[in-house]
Image: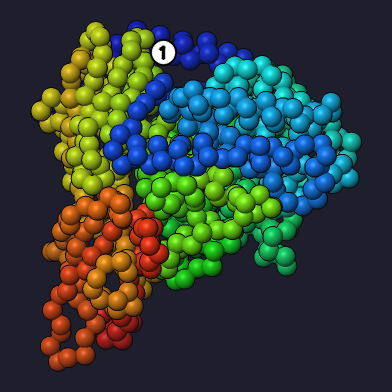
């Protein structure tokens, strides 16, 4: 047996890594992230294919000129719509795609998009599409935010000073426009000022890149204004359920609406950036409080939530039909918030949530070839395409979906001061730097989540002492972890297993996770059952032959309460996973009917084939008064 404390990581490696971080962030950051993304990666298998499909069929086919058209001076006539977000959403997706898979073609597209947008910037610094008399209204500041995020992402990629200057001029113009008005950002636009004040994120990034204190002061002022009586009160209300922070408004999509899910989480992303700059712990605590509340009261089995784009206490009623459920923009922002917190803290609970969201809500929103994205995706029903918005033949979720898709790979294997951390199990190669500055490569061999097996092999020139942390998912109750065939002791789920030793080329870590089918109950008491296997939600689909989706079926379980799942042959063009399980059907005979075999597939594939179909995650159970009104036995 290998004790996890066999070899302590050398003090020298800690000191050098910490000094390097301090040098990189001198004068800009008070709190450094625990984890740093891989410097390069190449995914293969299922997820690798999804990423390549998105690049080919969504990122590269976008008509860039169409995205830039609204910003031209002659077209600045808008008074209420949100065309100005589309360029930034698509562009930040494209930058992530380029970081993942650099290519000459994509670089040329990025350069064209930046040049085209900057060409629309007028001498006052404005980039947007709103008429002069309607500046700061509706979605104007929100659109400016996405232009800044796009330009700053390009600066981060290329160090192109024109992009940084362009973003700075947008920010300066915004500050000037606000000061000419009344200086109050939380009274501009809709949703208690959350859409407008989510500009906090690029403002904080601008301070990091320029060290100009006016941006830090503006960021602090935005957060101060949150606590005004007419503001969103994102700090003081962080311990209140996100669906109950304000009274239900008369007009659902309005300035009075304080439950807007996407915009609220965007503000909290910005607050984490301000926490990094200031070290003010109240900022971080407000985000953590809200994250815990969202997870506990809103996030459904597929890792998303919100109805008609608002928080509504939805976790409790997720087995009922919900109107306009689980907007893709909400799924993407929840994923990004989780990965922000993961990067900041290194805590495995954020990776648990991110993994569930990615494999279910995110991939379930993406069409089979990656060309389109659903706007809403129910848990029971069918996947229907959204419609174009703002006369652009594009909607917010189609623009935003790839931002989530390409966010995930950078968090699979990450560097940390002590060594590295394996958060997710995805076939591919990941390049990092060891604590002593050596080139370090991690090669994952796995078909996870089809199976629970993962092998990770190290490639490093010289032996070096450091620590490798491995996430053991909360749902995995039986686990086996070995290094070079020797068992690692004390492996517990819901946290990190840390292995400290001298690592050398060819060392192999092997992990076996518990992939038994788990029954998930809905609500207080059982109204419905769903089945999960690993991080994957399983679903029935009308494409499969057998009993209709309306039938009442009780899952058959073993003595430990697990569902026995029989793997069926793959059909990659139709679904990622395919299983069969036994169920007891509703019966009116004296002797209960015997079990029947029912096919199940992964949620992301359900209703998402080349032909439209209906699907079902939640399986309603019979109410039996003999059992105090609970499900039949």
Name the residue rendered at 17%, 70% in the picture: 597
Measured along the vertical axis of the image, is residue 624 above or below residue 188? Answer: below
The residue carrying mark 1 is 17
Q: Position of residue 114 (x, y in %)?
A: 65, 27
Question: Which quarter of the rendered picture does the C terminus lie within?
Answer: bottom left
Q: Secondary structure at mark 1?
A: helix
The residue at the point 44 percent across, 50 percent down is 366
Left or right: where does residue 592 sit relative to residue 122? Answer: left
Residue 137 x %, y % = 80, 47
State left or right for residue 26 relative to residue 586.
right
In x, y percent, where is residue 133? 89, 45
Q: Position of residue 168 (x, y in %)?
A: 73, 24
Q: Residues within 10 Å of mark 1 (few under 14, many from 20)?
A: some
- Picture quadrant of residue 382: bottom left
Tell me which residue sits at (69%, 19%) in the image. 162
123 w.r.t. 427: above or below: above
Asked if residue 71 shows in the view, the reply is yes
Q: Is residue 88 left or right of residue 358?
A: right
- The answer to whether residue 285 is visible is no
Q: Is the N terminus in the top left, top right, bottom left or bottom right quadrant?
A: top left
Q: Is residue 142 above or below residue 4?
A: below
Q: Nearer the viewer, residue 234 or 130?
A: 130
Q: How is the image coloured?
A: rainbow
Q: Give 573 or 77, whichever is nearer the viewer.
A: 573
Which quadrant holds residue 74? top right
């Amino acid at each position: 047996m290998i004790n996890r404390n066999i070899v302590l990581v050398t003090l020298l490696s800690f000191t050098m890594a910490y000094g390097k971080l301090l040098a990189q962030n001198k004068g800009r950051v008070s709190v450094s992230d625990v984890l740093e993304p891989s410097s390069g990666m190449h995914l293969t298998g299922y997820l690798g294919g999804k990423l390549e499909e998105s690049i080919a069929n969504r990122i590269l086919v976008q008509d860039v000129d169409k995205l830039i058209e609204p910003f031209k001076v002659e077209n600045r006539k808008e008074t209420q719509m949100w065309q100005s977000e589309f360029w930034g959403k698509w562009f930040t997706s494209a930058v992530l795609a380029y970081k993942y898979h650099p290519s000459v073609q994509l670089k040329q597209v990025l350069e064209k998009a930046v040049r085209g947008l900057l060409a629309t910037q007028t001498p006052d610094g404005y980039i947007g599409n709103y008429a002069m008399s309607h500046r700061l209204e509706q979605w104007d500041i929100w659109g400016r935010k996405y232009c800044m995020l796009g330009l700053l992402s390009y600066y981060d990629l290329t160090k192109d000073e024109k992009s940084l200057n362009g973003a700075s001029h947008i920010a300066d113009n915004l500050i000037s426009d606000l000061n000419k008005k009344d200086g109050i950002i939380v009274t501009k636009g809709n949703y208690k000022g959350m859409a407008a004040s989510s500009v906090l994120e690029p403002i904080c990034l601008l301070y990091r890149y320029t060290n100009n204190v006016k941006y830090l002061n503006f960021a602090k002022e935005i957060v101060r204004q949150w606590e005004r009586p007419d503001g969103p009160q994102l700090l003081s209300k962080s311990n209140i359920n996100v669906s109950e922070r304000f009274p239900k408004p008369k007009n659902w999509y309005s300035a009075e609406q304080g439950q807007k899910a996407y915009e609220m989480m965007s503000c909290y992303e910005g607050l984490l950036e301000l926490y990094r700059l200031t070290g003010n712990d109240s900022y971080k605590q407000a985000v953590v409080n809200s994250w815990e509340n969202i997870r506990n009261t809103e996030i459904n089995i597929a890792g998303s939530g919100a109805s008609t784009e608002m928080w509504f206490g939805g976790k409790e009623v997720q087995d009922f039909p919900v109107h306009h459920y689980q907007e893709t923009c909400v799924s993407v922002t929840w994923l990004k918030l989780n990965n922000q917190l993961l990067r900041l803290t290194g805590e495995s609970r954020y990776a648990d949530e991110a993994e569930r969201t990615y494999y279910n809500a995110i991939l379930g929103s993406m069409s089979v070839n990656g060309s389109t994205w659903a706007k809403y995706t129910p848990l029971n029903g069918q996947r229907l395409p959204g419609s174009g918005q703002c006369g652009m033949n594009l909607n917010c979720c189609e623009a935003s979906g790839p931002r989530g898709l390409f966010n995930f790979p950078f968090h699979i294997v990450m560097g940390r001061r002590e060594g590295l951390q394996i958060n997710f199990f995805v076939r591919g190669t990941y390049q990092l730097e060891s604590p002593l500055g050596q080139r370090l490569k991690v090669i994952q061999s796995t078909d996870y989540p089809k199976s629970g097996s993962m092998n990770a092999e190290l490639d490093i020139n010289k032996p070096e002492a450091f620590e490798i942390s491995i996430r053991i998912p909360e749902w995995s109750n039986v686990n086996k972890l070995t290094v070079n065939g020797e068992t690692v002791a004390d492996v517990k789920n819901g946290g990190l297993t840390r292995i400290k030793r001298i690592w050398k080329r060819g060392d192999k870590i092997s992990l076996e996770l518990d992939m038994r089918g788990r029954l998930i109950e809905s609500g207080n008491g059982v109204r419905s059952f769903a089945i999960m296997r690993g991080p994957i939600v399983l679903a029935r689909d009308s494409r499969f032959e057998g009993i209709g989706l309306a039938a009442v079926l009780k899952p058959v379980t073993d003595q430990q309460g697990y569902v026995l799942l029989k793997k069926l042959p793959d059909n990659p063009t139709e679904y990622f996973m395919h299983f069969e399980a036994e169920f007891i059907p509703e019966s009116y005979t004296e002797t209960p009917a015997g079990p029947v075999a029912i096919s199940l597939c992964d949620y992301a594939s359900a209703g998402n084939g080349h032909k439209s179909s209906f699907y079902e995650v939640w399986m309603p159970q019979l109410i039996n008064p003999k059992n105090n009104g609970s499900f039949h036995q």
